[in-house]
């Protein structure tokens, strides 16, 4: 993501993002892309977080970091190889066109409070 940011790329696509590991309480293990998502002003399109991770804690981390998760054509956060996880996304768009018309995909990254973290999109 840092290299893409350096090259001026504002939309990045990946199969699945990392997240908070299931044994977090014992190891403190969180994938490095969690801090990248929270700090790099970029849209990340993905198939959700890898299902071997702790998905509820991953979504909680993204919420705490101010990185909204938007579902395209779904109200549910996908579990990488499965379209459903039972967990809600922060916002849902019926289509990419509707999302494109919204401010969230225009590249207008700075929020009123001055923050400028990334946005995660899942479908």
Image (tube, grey):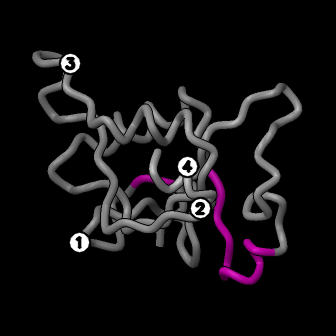
User: How far apart are the two marked residues, 3 and 2, measured between alpha carbons?
Assistant: 31 Å
**Which numbered disc flags the more N-terminal residue, 4 or 1?**
4
Circle 2 residue: 9
Residue 106 falls in which quadrant of the image?
bottom right
Q: Nearer the viewer, residue 89 or 12?
A: 12
The CA distance from mark 3 to mark 4 is 29 Å
Label 1, label 3: how far apart the Cα atoms are:
25 Å
Of the pair 21 and 40, the residue shown nearer to us: 40
Q: Eyeballing the image, is 21 above or below 75?
A: above
Name the residue that disc number 4 marks.
Answer: 6
Examine the rendered structure and indicate whether residue 69 appears above or below residue 37.
Answer: below
State which region is magenta: 87-100
Q: Which residue has dot 1 on it?
A: 81
Do callouts 3 and 2 mark residues in contact (Cβ within 8 Å)? no
Q: Is residue 7 visible?
A: yes
Mark nearer the N terminus (3 vs 2): 2
Give SS at disc 2.
Answer: loop
Identify the residue at horizontal 81%, vertical 27% (top origin): 114
- Of badges 3 and 4, nearer the viewer stands 4
């Amino acid at each position: 993501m840092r290299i893409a940011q350096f090259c001026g790329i504002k939309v990045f696509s990946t199969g699945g993002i990392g997240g908070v590991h299931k044994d977090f309480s014992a190891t403190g293990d969180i994938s490095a892309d969690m801090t990248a998502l929270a700090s790099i002003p970029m849209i990340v399109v993905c198939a959700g977080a890898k299902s071997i991770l702790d998905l509820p804690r991953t979504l909680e981390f993204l919420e705490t970091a101010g990185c909204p998760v938007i579902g395209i054509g779904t109200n549910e956060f996908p579990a990488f190889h499965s379209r459903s996880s039972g967990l809600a996304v922060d916002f849902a768009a019926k289509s990419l066109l509707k999302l494109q018309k919204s401010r969230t995909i225009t590249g207008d990254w700075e929020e009123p409070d001055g923050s400028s973290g990334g946005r995660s999109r899942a479908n």
